[in-house]
């Protein structure tokens, strides 16, 4: 049985990730009764602060929408305490140990969940300190870690080796928060619980697949981090690749974590490294009206940086199911809208009975406005036999009553509390992912691929439409607008 009462220890408790994601998610779980009310949460960071200041960090991004929320918050805060200390001093982790033991005694917890909301620079020293001071026989230890998992294959392997020397794979939970998103979790059900989808999910029926991530915001405030990594490491090599994996993998033997992850690794291993001709990159400049700054105007970004803030790449999976089907991944910051979606475009129907046909598409809208819709050809109502594009539309907001989509982090923290690894990234999966991207990243880092400038708030760099068309995507000449389309 993997269910244990956990003490949660948030390392880096005053940082951005902890305040924006970890604490609001823990509160979300608490108020919806998914967190055992006996759970104790200990924050740890370098800053000295009193309880009131710490509570200020916890509540900063918590949204209180109902009276119940407002009632739950003070009770939640009672579960939280704070301990300051350095990240490399055994002494400080010994003090933390005393605190953990104290709360364990009171709650009866038998597991410890260490949430590493930390920058990569202190990561291994904290993991080492935990291992030396807070690792106890007979108590289950779980460690949640966050990207970046290295910069390339080599550094990722080094990190895996260093962490692997301290903790077992069973103890490690690598977060890719896209795996906690409602629609991403729906992918296996859509594919494997519907004959009508399952049977056409292959190269015989599908022409091309696009996975698109768009954000309206630029790198605002994160230029320093971002410039070192670029958009491919920031979202494509992890979030978009995870989506691709779930779209492309073979059905797992069961929903068990290792069965699912075995299939994910397998499909990644069929993907050769991305070819230089299959990538297009961009970097945003000032908005057309001059109000929004360009990437290079960010004071934390080095002058003349060639780091891409937009990228489109095409991947191919060389197996029986997918040979010849391009998987086009596109992502960018400072674009015209915010959305993540998967667009599966089918081949043309054979025969010449009709003119003016468009290809079928299954569109899975990950966010915002979660939906699945299928674009189909239909007879235009009335006399005559004219064809028109229509859709079968499952929009969550109209189909489900009072739908509340849980935050990705809530879903993943709950999994880790329950000891379920299926929505976390396994070490060999990470390795396979880096193998696909490392060569092209090296080429980009060397400055060999010049990013194409695009204006803040535009649809992206010139050439994207041609790039997508080159890989088979066909825009229909019939006008079609998804009725639930709305600018977020
Ligand atoms: C993060 C990236 O992993 O994902 C950010 O570092 C990006 O740059 C974010 O904005 C997007 O996540 P979401 O959940 O807002 O789509």
Image (tube, rainbow, N blue to C red):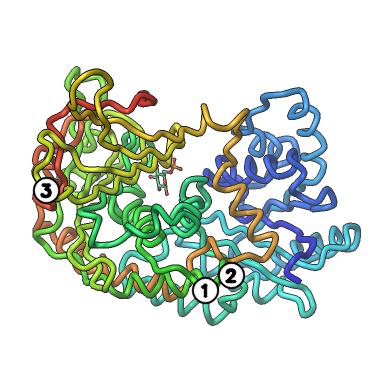
Q: Is residue 197 above or below residue 221?
A: below
- How packed mark 1 is, by other alpha carbons closer than 10 Å (few <14, some 14-19, many 20 or more), is few
Inter-mark Cα distance, 3 to 2: 44 Å
Image x and y of residue 81, in percent: 77, 48
Q: Is residue 56 above or below residue 90?
A: above
Identify the disc placed on residue 303. Answer: none
- How packed mark 3 is, by other alpha carbons closer than 10 Å (few <14, some 14-19, many 20 or more), is few
- The quadrant of the picture occupied by the C terminus is top left
Nearest the eye: 477 or 447 = 477
The residue identified by callout 3 is 351
Nearest the eye: 219 or 36 = 36
Residue in the picture at 32% in, 57% down:
200
- The quadrant of the picture occupied by the N terminus is bottom right
Image x and y of residue 68, in percent: 77, 28
Q: In the displayed image of the protein, which residue is found farthest to the front?
A: 383
Residue in the picture at 56% in, 76% down:
169
Image x and y of residue 85, in percent: 66, 57
Image x and y of residue 346, in percent: 23, 49
The residue identified by callout 1 is 253
In the image, ligand 1 is in what quadrant? top left
Q: In the displayed image of the protein, which residue is found farthest to the right?
A: 106
Q: Identify the element where label 2 is drawn.
A: loop
Nearest the eye: 479 or 78 = 479
Report if the CB atoms under discs 2 and 1 are less than 8 Å apart: yes
Name which of mark 3 and mark 2 comes first in the sequence. 2
Identify the disc placed on residue 256. Answer: 2
The number of numbered badges drawn on the structure is 3
Residue in the picture at 54% in, 46% down:
408
Name which of mark 1 and mark 3 comes first in the sequence. 1
Q: Is residue 224 above or below residue 392?
A: below
Inter-mark Cα distance, 1 to 3: 39 Å
Between circles 2 and 1, the one closer to the viewer is 1
């Amino acid at each position: 049985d993997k269910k244990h009462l956990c003490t949660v220890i948030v390392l880096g408790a005053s940082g951005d990730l902890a305040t924006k994601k970890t604490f609001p998610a823990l509160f979300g779980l608490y108020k919806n009764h998914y967190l055992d009310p006996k759970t104790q949460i200990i924050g740890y960071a370098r800053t000295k602060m009193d309880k009131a200041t710490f509570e200020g960090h916890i509540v900063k991004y918590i949204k209180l929408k109902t009276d119940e929320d407002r009632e739950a918050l003070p009770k939640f805060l009672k579960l939280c305490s704070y301990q300051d200390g350095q990240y490399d001093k055994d002494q400080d982790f010994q003090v933390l140990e005393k605190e953990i033991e104290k709360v364990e005694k009171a709650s009866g917890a038998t597991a410890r969940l260490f949430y590493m909301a930390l920058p990569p620079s202190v990561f291994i020293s904290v993991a080492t300190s935990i291992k030396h001071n807070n690792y106890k026989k007979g108590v289950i230890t779980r460690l949640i870690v966050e990207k970046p998992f290295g910069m390339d294959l080599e550094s990722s392997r080094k990190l895996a080796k260093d962490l692997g020397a301290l903790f077992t794979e069973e103890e490690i939970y690598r977060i890719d928060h896209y795996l906690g998103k409602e629609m991403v979790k729906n992918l296996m059900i859509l594919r494997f619980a519907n004959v009508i989808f399952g049977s056409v999910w292959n190269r015989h029926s599908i022409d091309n697949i696009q996975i698109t991530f768009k954000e309206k915001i630029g790198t605002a405030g994160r230029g320093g981090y971002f410039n070192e990594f670029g958009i491919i490491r920031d979202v494509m090599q992890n979030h978009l690749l995870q989506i691709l994996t779930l779209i492309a993998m073979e059905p797992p033997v069961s929903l068990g974590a290792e069965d699912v992850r075995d299939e994910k690794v397998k499909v990644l291993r069929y993907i050769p490294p991305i070819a230089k001709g299959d990538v297009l990159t961009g970097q945003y400049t000032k908005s057309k009206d001059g109000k929004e700054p360009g990437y290079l105007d960010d004071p934390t970004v080095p002058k003349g940086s060639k780091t891409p803030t937009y990228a489109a790449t095409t991947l191919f999976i060389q197996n029986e199911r997918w040979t010849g089907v391009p998987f086009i991944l596109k992502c960018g910051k400072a674009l015209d809208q915010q959305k993540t979606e998967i667009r599966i475009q089918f081949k043309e129907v054979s025969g010449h009975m009709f003119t003016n046909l468009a290809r079928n598409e299954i569109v899975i809208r990950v966010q915002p406005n979660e939906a699945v819709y299928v674009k189909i050809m239909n007879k235009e109502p009335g006399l005559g036999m004219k064809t028109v594009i229509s859709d079968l539309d499952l929009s969550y907001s109209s189909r489900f009553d009072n739908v509340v989509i849980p935050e990705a982090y809530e879903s993943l923290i709950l999994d880790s509390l329950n000891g379920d690894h299926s929505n976390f990234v396994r070490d060999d999966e990470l390795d396979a992912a880096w193998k696909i991207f490392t060569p092209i990243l090296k080429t980009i880092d060397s400055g060999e691929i010049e990013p194409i400038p695009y204006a803040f708030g535009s649809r992206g760099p010139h050439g994207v439409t041609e790039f997508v068309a080159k890989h088979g995507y066909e825009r229909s000449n019939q006008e079609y607008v998804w009725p639930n389309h709305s600018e977020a």
